[in-house]
Amino acid sequence: MADTSKHTSRFGDRLNSISPSTVSRTLFFLFMFMGIMARIWQFGIVPGDIHQDEAFAGYEAYSLLHYGMDSAGYRFPVYLTVWGSGMSALNSYLMIPFMALFGPQIWVIRLPQVIVGCLTLLVTYLTVKRLTNKTAALCALFLLAISPWHIALSRWGLDANLAPGFLMFGFYFFLRGMDKSKYLMLSGLMYGLSLYCYATIWPMVPLIIILEFGYGLLSKKIRFDKYFIISAFILAVFALPLMLFLLVNMGLIEEIRLPFLSIPKLVQMRGSEISLDRIPEKLTRLWHVMKVQSDGIPANGTEQFGIYHMGTLSFFMLGLFYCVKTTLTHWYKKEFSNEFFLLVQVGTGLIQGALIYTNIHRSNMLFIPMIIIAAIGIYYLCSLIDLRYLALLAVFYLVLFAGFERYYFTDFRDLMDYYFCRGLKDAVTEAVSYEGTIYYSRGQEHSRILFLSQEPVTEFIDTVEYFNYPSPYLVAKSFGRFCSEFDAAAPDKNAIYLLSQDVDLSAFEQQGFILHTHGYYTVAYHPENVSNP
């Protein structure tokens, strides 16, 4: 028998010769690859077709690109007036260059979100590495890369989904700014842009900035120099239009219409979403969402796998204990504490949860800080026992991740097909190819019809009628050649119908309509009266 002891010894020698930095680099690229692939695999197909909010954001981008105005006639508004109660504008503005290159496709309007989602993985790693060490940073990157919430968030174009990423960008450049002041300008830029991601973070961003910059100045990590002043100026430039927007919608000043900028007046403002009312009830709701990792809204995530996988909340509590203990110890010794900044991030997220009625996308500023602190909790626990246990935990999470990926692209995909209206794109494409009035079922929402048909915004503004004007959730009755009010029992042979599954098709069949089914939708037209141009 051949002597294998020499070969075994050589293999062991080669293993021992691998440096820790090589292992760290390998794991970093592996985790980044996993995270990016989980976000781009079948991107634009799952989920599909399109959500009503991302459709409106996409239509606003299309209108601004081609007509220089939004669906209410405002030129380059700081806040969109969609639905009557509005939507944050940054998402639509980020879509415009991609739409100019590739056209108004569904995957195009999701590009800003997937790019921000992937960049957030990198920035999270760099942030935790700066705050702690490479091993803890790899733990944080790994947990975020496989997070069901963050994967789902990165794959569709809701305006609120941009907020966690831009808050992390602002936080990272702030930390860089403590070493080199010039990075404070980028921090100011990112925090300023975050204000245009989602309105529920408006009270939180100033609080984050005050606490971070205040502690930085107090500990003499930040210098009051020209870069500090420039960063404050950048923040003020971004905040001023939104302050004017609030004054306009509180009725204190008139709306502002300029050739290059608009401060619009909403039909109705949802000011009650952020309030000091029922704080105990809101905190109870927040804890429930954190614990069960679901809010009952299918598009916000999978109930089976949650926000950050089972067991992570326990690690978060351990990490929170470590951060509080370490911060207090340093405070008592009058020493600087990096952990204080993590407590600011998670603390402001919890404060936000006391001011709003939580669901996952409303409170999404909380979850990346939670995942980071959970990663620190894992690292802290394993450092007390044996760091080799990190490998066992990684296997545990990889099993959960594999289960989530399988579920997301099978059963969850089928569920999202309903909520994202599978087949509607093809149905609208067919319907608009015929001449005549197009009747559509009420459940399709006019935002989807607008984007998928590429309705000229001037035509929409001139012709739209609503069922419920004024309202914070407007429902269009008709616009252009589209109408959502019809009698399915007595169909008009001169019209085209865009019908959802709940419409009885018997009258159409009896009168000789041709029916073409696309996913959950049916296009009906009469061949004798409807022609294809």
Image: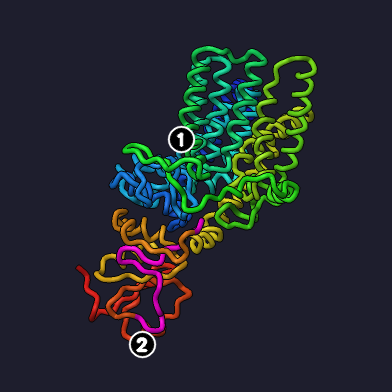
The residue at the point 43 percent across, 45 percent down is 264
Left or right, 459 with respect to 271, comes to left
Callout 1: helix, strand or loop?
helix
The residue at the point 52 percent across, 25 percent down is 187
Residue topped by disc 2: 510
Q: Is residue 7 in view from this perspective?
A: no
Q: Does label 2 or label 1 sit earlier along the sequence?
A: 1
Residue at the limit of the structure toward the bottom, as seen here: 510
Of 225 and 511, which appears nearest the observer?
A: 225
Residue 397 x %, y %:
65, 43
Where does the magenta region start and end?
Answer: 471-491
Residue type at numbered disc 2: Gln
Residue 278 x %, y %:
72, 49
User: Disc number at residue 379?
Assistant: none
**Helix, strand or loop for the magenta stretch, by majority:** loop
Q: Is residue 311 above or below residue 511?
A: above
Residue topped by disc 1: 241
Residue 190 x %, y %:
50, 30
